[in-house]
Each structure stands twice: as structure tokens, then as C-alpha cells.
Amino acid sequence: MLGARDIVDCTLRVLQNDPASIVPDGPFLDWSKKHHAPQKSLRGAMVSVPLVIDGKSTTSEGTTLRARVVMLENEEEQFVLVSLTLLGLTAQANAFLRNEIARQTGISSRAIMIACTHVHSGPATLTADERQTAALLEAISQSLSSALEEAQAKMAPIRLAVAKRPVEGLTRIRRVCMNDGKAYTIRRAVPSTWRSELKAEYAEPDGELDTDLTVARVEDLSGNVLGCLFHFSTHPLPDLHGYAADWMEKAWGEGFVCLPLNGAMGDVDTIFAQPFNGKFAQEQLPGMGRVLSGAIQELLGRGEAKDDATLKVRASDFSLPVDPFVIEQRRDDPIEWIGEAARKKMFSTQMQAVQLGPLTLVGLPGELASSVGLKIKTHSPFQYTCPVGLANDEVGYLITKASRRLGGYEADPAHWALTASGGAEIVYTQAVKLFSDQGR
């Protein structure tokens, strides 16, 4: 005798194959035809390959240096997403790599996003001299070439499933306001800045923390999981992104790819100066890494796969003004790309908005304040929106006008506050414009 579940399953299969054969004309048939209408196909592939830079394949914390690639296409668009476990790359370095990818794949460079996780325990990619940079780009290019070749061979129909939830207790706003009206930054190497909330002069954090973890599962049409993307915002001190990606790939085995993306993390750090399982700083990595990895694993199972083949890529070129101090004092900076920006008095940069089914990635050209990233997410018309830090460029810290007036490390143009006040607001405006363009 058939049970209720058998009857329902059989009915749904018949309806999916040919609902008109058993259902008369009416509202239910209209719904069924719409529900089971043929969908455009989304094709994709994921690949993870090692990076070897200066003879090293790991960071000083033991996490791996890797290039992870997602290649996607439908009938109308193509897109390549690259995640590199590196501190960051300049616009010039990114342009070289994007052009190399475009040459190999035939995909427009405007539909290629290269994002660095901003790991601090890896090679010094932002302060390298010309010869070091050339060797670095050659190493990355070789790895990407093999990854792209493998991805092109693996392209097949896929589905995406997205889920998110907050992960508390791993990160914090590192800029703190004191009762004298100024802000300073809790620095890993400056113990006098630790435990600021216990100081009598402490007032409040300067900023709003985004603790969301977003995970996109990639699977074939039979439901076999191929890999995932995850998005989480923090300065990786220690290397949370690398640890979690390595752990997921090891746990799932050969062929599984876990692609990490950082977010709006210009004023966000891990809690290195506070105890976590009795550990501090880099010693916290295994404990915090297991927490983040476990949350990724959970969300990997929670997302509901949809036959949504939406793939839209929009890019916008714009300029960010350079801070007057940088223009006046850093024209001959030993870091050549900073000196070049000072002489040009602007960063010529680009942002992208890429819609992948229910998920939209917004590429940010630097290290944006968490509060501005949250504002971008709030004003996005899409179900899931992830502002991706260090995408295709590095222009330094982008914090709000109000935060810059308070001072602190992220507001100091002698360090990495390279854009003029208002840069963060310009980036937000560009994001909103891209959302409008995406709706066309």
C-alpha cells in the first residue's frame, strides 16, 4: 500500500514532467507551469591551487597561500572571481592579472574580480619594490593560469544556495572613543592600547560592527556539493579566513573548494588582545578558526538550492581624491604606488556589483569602515549582499568623515589614510548607483 509520502512524491514528479496531462485548465495549472517553467542554465566550476611566493607556500601561521577561482556563465554573461590569500594588491598589479585572465579566457576584464583576504602573516605584497612585484605577479599568474585551465575543463550546470547568520565574539571595532573627544586604535603590537574598555577615560567604540557570516553553497544538479564561498569581515589577525578555508577543504576532501572573501573591515580586528580559550593573539587561531569553520559548515547545510541562473555584472569607473598631506609630503614615497597617487592627486579605481542568483557581491577598492559596509547592505535591493574588501585595488583606509575628525591610526595620512576625507561616502554613493544599474 502506498503511503501519503509516496503519493505526494509521485504526484509532484508527474506534475514536474507534464502537469497539463493530468490537471485541467485553471489556477493550479497556471501556477504549476510557472513553477516548473524551464530555467536558464547557470554553469560554473571551482578550483583551488597553491601559491608559491619567495619559495614559501604558507604564512608564518601555517595557513596555506592559495589562489581560489570560481568561473560562472549563463547565456548572457560570464564572470570570474579570484580569492588570493595575500595582504593586498595595487590597482596596477590587479590590472595586470585581470588582463592575463581575460587573455586566457576571453572574458572581459570588467567581469573579473580579484579579492585579497588581507592576511598579515604572508608575503609583503604592498611594499614590494619593482623587481619583487614582477616576480610576485609572475608566480600568481602561473598559478592562476593552471587554475583557469582546470576550471574551463570542469564547467557544468550548477545551482547556488545561500544562507547567513551572525557569528559573535570573534571580532570587534578596533577604534575607540575617549572622553577627550579623540579616538585611538587598539593595536596588536601596542599593549598600552589593550583593554581600552576598562580605562576610566573610555567612552564608546567608534563604529558599528558587522558580524554576519554569509555562505554560498555551489552544487551540481544532482545535489553533489562542489564547494562554497564565505564572506566574513575582519582584519585577519590571526588568519581566520585562511584557517577556515584550509579546514573546510581538508574536511571535505579532494576537489572541494572553499573560497574566502573579506568585507568592510577597515576598523575591525579579531579580539587578539582579549583571552579566547585562555589564548591571546596568534595563539587564538586554532580556537577561533574552529568556531568560524563550524559556522561555515552549518550554513553550508542550511542554504536552500534554487534553480536561479541570474548572473549580472556591472562595473563603474570613478576617482577618489588623495589626502592633501599625501599630496604634499609623500610624492617621493618609497612605496611607489603611493607616490604615484600623490603626484596624480587621485586614485583612478573601479567598483563592481555582481549578482549571482540571490547573492550580490560589491567589490570595494580598499579597506572600508564596517558601518559603511552595513549601510551598503541596508540599502541594497537584493536578498543577500556582501561588500568585498580589497577587490581589484587597494586605496588604504576608507572611514567616515566623522571618524576622520576624531583622529587615530586609520585617519592618519602618514600611514594608510591615503584618500581625502569623504572617500568612504563616495564609495557608498557608487555602490548605490551600481544597485540601480543592476536593476536594468
Image (cartoon, grey):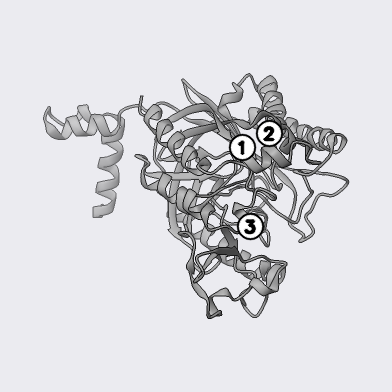
| Residue 409: assigned label | 3
Which residue was labeled with disc 2?
Answer: 341
Q: Earlier in the sequence, mark 1 or mark 2?
A: 1
Tell whether label 3 touches label 2 (CB within 8 Å). Answer: no
User: Dot 3: within a 10 Å radius of its alpha carbon, few (fewer than 14), some, or many (20 or more) residues?
Assistant: some
The type of residue carrying mark 2 is: Ala
Which residue was labeled with disc 1?
Answer: 322
Tell whether label 2 touches label 1 (CB within 8 Å). Answer: yes
Q: Position of residue 195 (x, y in %)?
A: 59, 76
Judging depth in this view, the residue of 177 and 91 nearest the camera is 177
Q: Is residue 64 shown left or right of residue 294?
A: right
Q: Earlier in the sequence, mark 2 or mark 3?
A: 2
Q: Earlier in the sequence, mark 1 or mark 3?
A: 1
| CA–CA distance in space, label 1 to label 2 | 7 Å
Q: Position of residue 55 (x, y in %)?
A: 88, 46
Question: Quarter-wise, where is residue 252 in the image?
Answer: bottom right
User: Dot 1: within a 10 Å radius of its alpha carbon, few (fewer than 14), some, or many (20 or more) residues?
Assistant: many
Q: Secondary structure at mark 2?
A: helix
